[in-house]
Amino acid sequence: MNILYFHQHFSTPKGSVGTRSYEMAQRLIERGHTVTMVCGSYGGGDTGLTSPFVNSRRTGVVDGINIIEVDISYSNSDGFLKRALTFVKFALVSVRIALVEKYDVVFATTTPLTAGIPGIFARWLRGKPFVFEVRDLWPELPKAMGVITNPVVLAAMSALEWVTYHSAHRLIGLSPGIVDGIVHKGISKAKVELVPNGCDLKLFNQDVQAWRPLGVAETDLLAIFAGTHGIANGLDALLDTAAELKRRGRSDIKLLLIGQGKLKPALMARAESEQLDNVIFHEPINKAKLSGLMASADIGLQLLANIPAFYFGTSPNKFFDYISAGLPVLNNYPGWLAGMITKHKCGFAVPPQDANAFATALEIASDDKDALTVMGQNALRLAEGEFDRTLLSNRFVDWLEGAKA
């Protein structure tokens, strides 16, 4: 099959963001299919293309993937209006591509929700099989976060969500809550497949050069957060914990934040103002370098703002990277990930907005490294048994192939 794959925020492993679409495209190619990836330019991402843009696009083949990169840039630091305009511009360009390219199946993945628009046109104007992947429930999540409050905008997004789901021949949800959310919109459960983010066991378990940032001793407990510094992540909770650890005199516990995002400058300013020298901020790094950092880390931090819509409606890349590397995970909100951590004894699940419980969990981790090692072994066992990306990507390809049958 020829698959036209839309992912606005696509990146190869050379970038510092998630690589799910790259990995799924590789599995499609290994199974004999042709993949054309349509994407924009994403801050922190790397498409692998280096030639100049001609007529607002550039094309090439990277690791067997035919890539069409349009000259529409996006950054998590952009304001709401700029991001919304970027999403709309990419959707309009994508519709034109969907109407002229040769392909057998069109696949689109969020975010944003507008990613599904070319699939709608491909389904109804060209009669193409359309598969839609939902990574976050929109507009439910932005509404719950208070990011979008305008009732007209929310109504328009709800209408787009309904039309997209009902236009797709098949859908994919990345978490149990996302699958339930799709079904709640009137979609038969038989049309929805659960394919969560997976674990790259090869990348995080190869021989790598372990390293720690300046200011972190080998004897320190190194807890890392690798992800976006945005509203959804609720990283002030981590600074609250840093302040509590400092009050307790635990200078041997270091908190490392890797990444970028709209709130990073404010977080850095707060840490400096409160003299939280147990917090270290680091620029984004690619997956290869991240694997070396994780090899020397002691625990991964899975953090989100305390919003009930997050509890079952997200499938965070960072959680799966942590357990791929055999890192125990400290999670600070309820839901399906907290349940897994508790069930498989691979870390700590603490209540949201509870700096005392968070700090105590880190102290327990620091004071009993042997128990922490066992948790890490359990984490890797969970990664291998339930979230091996090879197994999940085969499920993904099977589902896409079924759309053409």
Image (cartoon, rainbow, N blue to C red):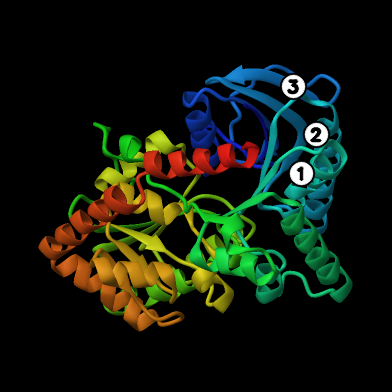
Q: Quadrant of residue 219?
A: bottom left
Count neighbours of disc 1 (C-alpha within 10 A) and say few if under 14, some if 14 to 19, many if 20 or more.
Answer: many
Vertical order, 328 against 217 (above or below):
below
Q: CA distance from mark 2 to mark 1?
A: 8 Å
**Which amino acid, by three-letter code, is at mark 1?**
Gly
Badge number at residue 58: 3
- Camera sees residue 132: yes
Q: What secondary structure is found at the residue carrying circle 2? A: helix
Count neighbours of disc 3 (C-alpha within 10 A) and say few if under 14, some if 14 to 19, many if 20 or more.
Answer: some
Badge number at residue 98: 2
Q: Nearer the viewer, mark 3 or mark 1?
A: 1
**Which amino acid, by three-letter code, is at mark 3?**
Arg
Q: What secondary structure is found at the residue carrying circle 1? A: helix
Q: CA distance from mark 3 to mark 2?
A: 17 Å
Instruction: Residue at 15%, 60% (x, y): give it.
Output: 374
Q: Nearer the viewer, residue 40 or 250?
A: 40
Q: CA distance from mark 3 to mark 1?
A: 22 Å
Q: Nearer the viewer, residue 48 or 226?
A: 48
Badge number at residue 119: 1
Q: Nearer the viewer, mark 3 or mark 2?
A: 2
Instruction: Residue at 86%, 41% (x, y): give it.
Output: 92
- Quadrant that contains the N terminus: top right
Measured as percent of width and height from the top left, residue 61 is found at: 61, 18
Question: Is disc 2 in contact with disc 1, using a CB cutoff of under 8 Å?
Answer: yes
Question: Is disc 3 in contact with disc 2, using a CB cutoff of under 8 Å?
Answer: no
Q: Quadrant of residue 213?
A: top left
Measured as percent of width and height from the top left, residue 259 is found at: 51, 50
